[in-house]
């Protein structure tokens, strides 16, 4: 069983997002990037599958200029190979274009199971696993947990909200968008990551991507922010009433 | 001008609230564009459930096994419908189904997808979508291309008008696509709750005063559909199990709503919850640090607030 | 296995009576053949952990180990359990030692937990056996340069509240006398920041020519090293040394005893050799220039940080400073100076709060706060950035809110000098 895990880095929300307030453009080069949290879970799930059957795990990232550390970390955690897709990519490359690049690669290099984080914080132009599957005409499912191999079929859980879940089974190849791994993503000690940097290589694969449908994002802007809580005055009854109406506005009240 | 296609979902055999919202929005756009609204639903109840939908036409897709959501079959079918109807917009809720269908169908049909949309309006010449990006830290304004797009919409974005209509319903029978099937529906897991997965946390701190008052928090949690979590002193005192502790040495949580009740907001606590979507804090001390991260605050005594809030929520 | 080094005298003369060493059955390690020693051998074969095998069960350490006062713990017990086949590698015991160094002070065989713990923990981290809480702190440090997971760009935000100049080296184009290595908790933790503000004002009042690294500074990494992440420590050390090497200064002054320890003993191994002082050592000779005029009529007791006192031998500077404050009545707790009990934050304890809680009856910080209360102190003076947060929390959790205050020495000095 050959597993491919699609990973990418996203702006670190611990730091400020950097925005040109006039043009509404994101200043990618001034932001710090970290591996997408959901992709970390996809890597973990792949490694857990590898531990219970002898799968071979490849991690892949589109080379947007900052992915080496992320890939070496995946190797240090136990992935077998790491691949960097090279071409005309940088931090501002759209998810759609990344998906197209990955689809080209997978077409030439088939895998049985493709995992990736179900979403990322920056994918308003589409979630990568679903787009890769759509482009390749492969079956896929999102919001997936608990992936296990059963002969040549892949069993997994899909979550529907409100605690509802189903177990599904799929033929291969299949693309799954991982919501959470069975265990918290493991820690790779820095010594091990550094050792990987010395002892292993990232395979570089060149891909050319044709024109893809892109979104016209007119601007990004910050929602009105509060530095201090807006205080709700009144007695318990009045405060309760106000809270309920705030919750209603946000669809947080059942029924 | 292509039609506006709305993928409907059903709860207990009726149109879901979110589907009603999408239809209301679709109707509004269709009116200003001079276009029509087509609802698309899957399963044996779709025909009945869409009979009074606020749409011009409806397509009810039936077939063996389609009452249960089948990612592969639904996606292939929707893709086929999109290629037949050439919709300007295809609107799907950002549910599990929407996450599957939205980007997948868009990619297969060479269309763009606009995800996490929470606003849609027409301006001079375009339809403009507003989307949530970076976990809500930024909003984006996106122009819907003239060639059309698939849009996944965050539930609760539009509100529904409650208007009903009389669409002409076409029933389309399909075979399920082999390759991916449902093995079984899983019962929700038992055992102590996992606070990291709860959408709503009713979190209590030392301000709860006495373990007997925990009952009030529990009742509130039940009324609001959430789970009780807490700060460390509550665990230290043995009033709640450690799995409920939020913070640096407990769990990190990102619920949709975090109600901080009698919690001062020490840095070790904030580390575990400051990224919640909405934080409402109740603390008799207005200058407590929790108020710096909370969106709303009140200085009402939590022992009064908890029952008042629970009662109101139950009354809804 | 390396042979134990005997440190008893071969011949001793006591009150004129000659005592030959061969009477001492402890002179050579006893052959203990009745046990299967494979588990012990596994542990002692880890480079750095050899000395665990030297233990001859005298029990001196049990009498001084702070963890023993809240649990069932000491090097002797760890040795014994491992000898009986319960490997330290898989035992919760591995994470309870705060590397406070109290046992090493008394151990006749120099069983050295300060070497054993990081060595065995490093192995455990590699094998994925470390508690999740600790790993979060490691991950934060690797990613953000601080264990709190705070944004690196905000490392200098505290400077705004100082309201005095705090020059950042990358902007100061000239050499300075003092490079102040601020560290993480003093940069980010609200109470740590209070101490930083106080110290910045003291430096300004004294006319010290100083600068900080600002956002170029990362955690010194010493506690992460003791907690088993040597690779992370090395990465941080290399970074800090590179940054420091860009600038000219006469000496480093640190707020944090853990950083002090790193600069004294570890950074030189990586090419970072500079004269370094803890801020109390730097300030003590300047007492006369500090204008400590405002009296503080309080009973104050001082908690010796393990990494300033026992690890590095400095007991006087903090006390000299406290005594210089008019009105201040310094009382010593029973456990003070070399016998001081640990606050529980060292050796990774800062990031194992919840884990430790499961294996001990009380937090060490609570134990210590109760001791301060017992001695009638109004203020518990500290001088390690882990302590303010730990002790303030412990004051509350032991129900002593309002009775005992926790203050960094810098805060007390700044108060007396009317700078805060
Ligand atoms: C190493 C370390 C790790 C830690 N890890 C964690 C952690 O993971 N999680 C955690 O939570 N803490 C942690 N702490 C403890 C933390 O420092 C605080 O002590 C703790 O969070 C305080 O909890 P609290 O807010 O419930 O209590 P308090 O700080 O005592 O606050 C109680 C609040 O309730 C208010 N109040 C009282 N009565 C009422 C009433 N009737 N109505 C309304 N408001 C009322 C008061 O005004 C007060 O602000 C840690 C500490 C350390 C040192
Ligand atoms: S270093 Fe301190 S905590 Fe660790 S075993 Fe020795 S005395 Fe106990
Ligand atoms: S003091 Fe040293 S020799 Fe004595 S029991 Fe403790 S570790 Fe062993």
Image (tube, rainbow, N blue to C red):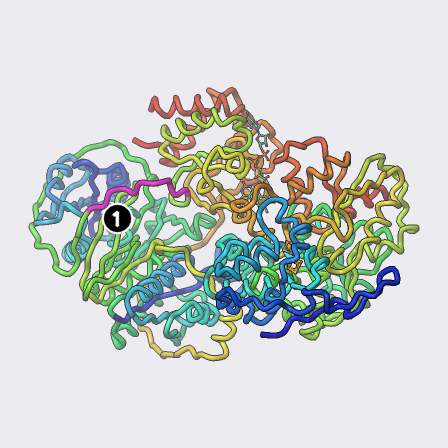
Residue B221 painted magenta: no
- x and y percentages locating residue B292 in the rendered image: 58, 39
Tell me: is circle 1 under 8 Å from ligand 1: no
Q: In which quadrant of this rendering is ligand 3 seen?
A: bottom right
- x and y percentages locating residue A141 in the rendered image: 25, 56
Q: Which residues are magenta?
A: B185-195
Residue C314, image quadrant: bottom right
Position of C6 compared to B258: left or right?
right
The answer to whether residue B202 is seen in the rendering is yes
Q: In the image shown, does C395 or A87 lie closer to the viewer?
A: C395
Of the 4 image quadrants, the one containing the N terminus of chain C is: bottom right
Position of C273 compared to B81: left or right?
right
Q: Label 1: few (<14), some or many (≥20) within 10 Å? A: many
Mark 1: secondary structure = strand
Residue reaching furthest right?
Answer: C288
Q: In the image shown, does A5 or B11 lie closer to the viewer?
A: A5
Q: Which residue corresponds to mark 1?
A: B91
- x and y percentages locating residue C41 in the rendered image: 52, 69
- x and y percentages locating residue A16 in the rendered image: 54, 54
Q: In the image shown, does C321 or B168 lie closer to the viewer?
A: C321
Q: Chain of mark 1?
A: B
Dominant secondary structure of the residues highlighted in magenta in the image: loop
Of the 4 image quadrants, the one containing the C terminus of chain C is: top right
């Amino acid at each position: 069983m050959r597993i491919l895990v699609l990973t990418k880095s996203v702006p670190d929300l611990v730091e400020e997002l950097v925005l040109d307030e006039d043009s509404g453009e994101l200043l990618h080069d001034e932001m710090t990037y970290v591996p997408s949290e959901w992709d970390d879970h996809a890597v973990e799930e792949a490694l857990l599958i590898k531990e219970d059957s002898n799968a071979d795990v490849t991690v892949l990232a589109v080379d947007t200029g900052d992915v080496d550390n992320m890939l070496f970390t995946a190797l240090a955690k136990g992935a077998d190979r790491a691949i960097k897709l090279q071409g005309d990519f940088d931090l501002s490359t759209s998810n759609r274009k990344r998906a197209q690049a990955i689809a080209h690669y997978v077409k030439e290099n088939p895998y049985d199971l493709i995992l990736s984080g179900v979403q990322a914080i920056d994918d308003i132009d589409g979630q990568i696993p679903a787009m890769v599957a759509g482009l390749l005409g492969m079956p896929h499912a999102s919001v997936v947990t608990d992936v296990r191999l059963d002969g040549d079929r892949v069993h997994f859980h899909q979550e529907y909200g409100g605690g509802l879940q189903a177990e599904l089974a799929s033929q291969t190849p299949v693309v799954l968008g991982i919501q959470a791994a069975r265990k918290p993503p493991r820690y790779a000690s820095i010594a091990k990551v550094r050792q990987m940097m010395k002892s292993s290589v990232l395979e570089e694969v060149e891909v050319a991507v044709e024109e893809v449908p892109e979104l016209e994002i007119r601007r990004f802007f910050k929602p009105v922010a509060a530095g201090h809580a807006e205080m709700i005055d009144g007695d318990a009854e009045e405060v309760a009433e106000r809270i309920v109406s705030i919750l209603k506005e946000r669809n947080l009240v059942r029924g | 001008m292509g039609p506006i296609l709305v993928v409907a979902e059903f709860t207990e055999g009726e149109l879901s609230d979110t589907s009603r919202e999408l239809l209301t929005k679709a109707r509004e756009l269709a009116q200003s564009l001079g276009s029509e609204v087509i609802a698309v639903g899957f399963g044996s109840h779709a025909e009945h459930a869409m009979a009074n939908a606020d749409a011009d036409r409806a397509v009810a897709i039936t077939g063996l096994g389609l009452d249960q959501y089948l990612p592969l079959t639904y996606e292939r079918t929707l893709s086929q419908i999109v290629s037949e109807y050439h919709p300007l917009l295809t609107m799907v809720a950002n549910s599990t189904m929407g996450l599957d269908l939205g980007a997948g169908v868009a990619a297969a049909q060479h269309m763009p997808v606009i995800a996490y949309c929470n606003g849609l309006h027409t301006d001079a010449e375009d339809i403009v979508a507003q989307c949530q990006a970076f976990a809500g830290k930024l909003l984006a304004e996106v122009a819907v291309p003239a060639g059309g797009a698939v849009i996944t919409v965050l539930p609760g974005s539009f509100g529904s008008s409650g208007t009903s209509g009389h669409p002409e319903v076409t029933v389309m029978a399909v075979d399920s696509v082999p390759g991916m099937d449902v093995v079984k529906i899983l019962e929700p897991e038992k055992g102590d709750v996992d606070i990291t997965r709860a959408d709503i946390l009713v979190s209590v701190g030392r301000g709860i005063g006495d373990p007997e008052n925990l009952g009030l928090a529990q009742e509130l949690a039940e009324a609001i559909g959430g789970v009780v979590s807490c700060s460390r002193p509550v665990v230290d005192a043995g009033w709640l199990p450690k799995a409920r502790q939020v913070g640096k040495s407990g769990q990190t949580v990102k619920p949709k709503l975090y109600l901080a009740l009698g919690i001062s907001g020490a840095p070790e606590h904030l580390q575990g919850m400051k990224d919640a979507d909405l934080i409402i804090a109740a603390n008799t001390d207005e200058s407590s640090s929790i108020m710096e991260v909370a969106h709303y605050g009140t200085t009402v005594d939590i022992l009064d607030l908890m029952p008042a809030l629970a009662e109101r929520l139950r009354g809804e | 296995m390396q042979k134990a080094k005997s440190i008893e005298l071969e011949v001793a003369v006591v009150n004129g009576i000659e005592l030959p060493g061969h009477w001492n059955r402890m002179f050579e390690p006893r052959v203990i053949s009745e046990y299967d020693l494979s588990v012990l051998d596994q542990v002692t074969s880890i480079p750095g952990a050899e000395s665990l095998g030297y233990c001859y069960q005298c029990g001196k350490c049990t009498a001084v180990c702070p963890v023993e006062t809240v649990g069932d713990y000491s090097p002797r017990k760890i040795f014994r359990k491992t000898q009986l086949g319960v490997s330290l590698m898989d035992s919760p015991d591995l994470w309870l030692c705060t590397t406070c160094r109290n046992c090493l002070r008394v151990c006749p065989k120099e069983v050295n937990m300060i070497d054993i713990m990081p060595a065995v923990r490093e192995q455990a981290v590699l094998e994925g056996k470390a508690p999740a809480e600790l790993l979060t702190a490691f991950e934060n440090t690797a990613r953000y340069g601080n264990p709190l997971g705070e944004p690196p760009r905000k490392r200098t935000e505290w400077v705004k509240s100082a309201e005095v100049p705090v020059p950042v080296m990358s902007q100061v184009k000239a050499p300075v006398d003092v490079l102040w290595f601020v560290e993480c908790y003093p940069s980010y933790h609200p109470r740590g920041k209070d101490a930083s503000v106080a110290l910045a004002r003291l430096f300004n009042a004294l006319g010290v020519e100083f600068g900080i690294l600002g956002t170029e500074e990362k955690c010194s990494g010493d506690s992460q090293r003791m907690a088993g992440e040597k690779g992370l420590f090395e990465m941080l050390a290399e970074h800090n040394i590179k940054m420091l090497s860009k600038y000219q200064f006469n000496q480093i002054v640190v707020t944090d005893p853990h950083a002090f320890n790193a600069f004294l003993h570890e950074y030189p191994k990586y090419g970072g050799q500079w004269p370094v002082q803890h801020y109390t050592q730097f300030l003590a000779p300047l007492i006369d220039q500090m204008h400590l005029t405002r009296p503080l009529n309080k009973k104050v007791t001082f908690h010796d940080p393990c990494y300033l006192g026992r690890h590095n031998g400095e007991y006087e500077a903090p006390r000299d400073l406290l005594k210089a404050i008019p009105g201040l009545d310094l009382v010593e707790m029973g456990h003070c100076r070399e016998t001081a009990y640990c606050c529980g934050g060292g050796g990774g304890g800062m990031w194992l709060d919840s884990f430790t809680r499961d294996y001990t009856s009380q937090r060490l910080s609570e134990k210590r706060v109760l001791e301060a209360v017992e001695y009638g102190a109004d203020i518990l003076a500290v001088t390690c950035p882990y302590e303010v947060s730990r002790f303030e929390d412990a004051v509350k959790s032991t129900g002593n809110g309002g009775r005992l205050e926790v203050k960094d020495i810098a805060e007390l000095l700044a108060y007396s000098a009317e700078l805060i």
